[in-house]
Image (spheres, rainbow, N blue to C red):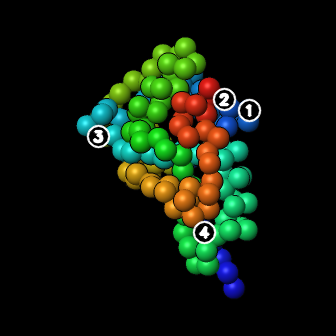
Amino acid sequence: MRVSILRVPGIYAPDREGGTPRTRLLRGTAVLRSEDDVYTNHIHAEDLARASLKALWHGRPQRIYHASDDTQLKMGDYFDLAADLYGLPRPPRISREQASAELPATLLSFMSESRRLCNQRLKQELGLKLLYPTVEQGLRG
């Protein structure tokens, strides 16, 4: 059996309910200060759909592809970028210790993993040309 695996990070899409960080920004949910922050990866829903089709028809057997865009951002910087694009206040920055006391466990779990995925295989082996190569371009969509 031939199987290809897509490793998918944060999916976003401005045209979908809850598809952007706008709601979280409006709530004023804090993010980690820079020295405690983690790297995060994203992919626009349209690019993910296209990557899925490419992997289905052109993926190598038992191959893992990182389905992410080209952006290299820490989580807080992602929310700052979105706030600036939407004309909203940037979220408050807090320490990891404060976050442990104030934020829900599910949110803390995202703030505990730092990854910088490389999407080179996605683009070279599958030949995917991203419609939204950066989060900024995707959020502007």
Q: Amino acid at mark 2?
A: Gly
Disc 2 + disc 1, Cβ < 8 Å: yes
Question: In terms of secondary structure, where does tag 4 sit?
Answer: strand
Decide: few, some or many residues near mark 4? Use Cα within 10 Å; few <14, some 14-19, many ≥20: some
Residue situated furthest left in the rendering: 35
Mark 1 to mark 3 CA distance (whole Å) = 32 Å
Q: Is residue 36 above or below residue 118?
A: above
- Residue at image mark 1: 15
Q: Residue at x 40, y 51 (%)?
A: 116
Of marks 2 and 1, which one's residue comes earlier in the chain?
A: 1
Q: Is residue 72 visible?
A: yes
Q: Nearer the viewer, mark 2 or mark 3?
A: 2
Q: CA distance from mark 4 to mark 3?
A: 31 Å
- The kind of residue on which mark 4 rests is Ile
Numbered circle sitting on residue 5: 4
Instruction: Please provide percent x and percent y for residue 53.
Output: 73, 60
User: What residue would you read off at disc 3?
Assistant: 36
Badge 2 is on which residue? 141
Query: Helix, strand, or loop for circle 1?
Result: loop
Query: Residue 7 or 110: which is nearer the viewer?
Result: 7
- The image position of residue 98, as x and y in percent, is 32, 35
Query: Which amino acid, by three-letter code, is at mark 1?
Result: Asp
Instruction: From the viewer's perspective, tell me whether residue 49 is left or right of residue 127.
Output: right
Q: Earlier in the sequence, mark 4 or mark 2?
A: 4
Labels 4 and 3: the sequence-earlier one:
4
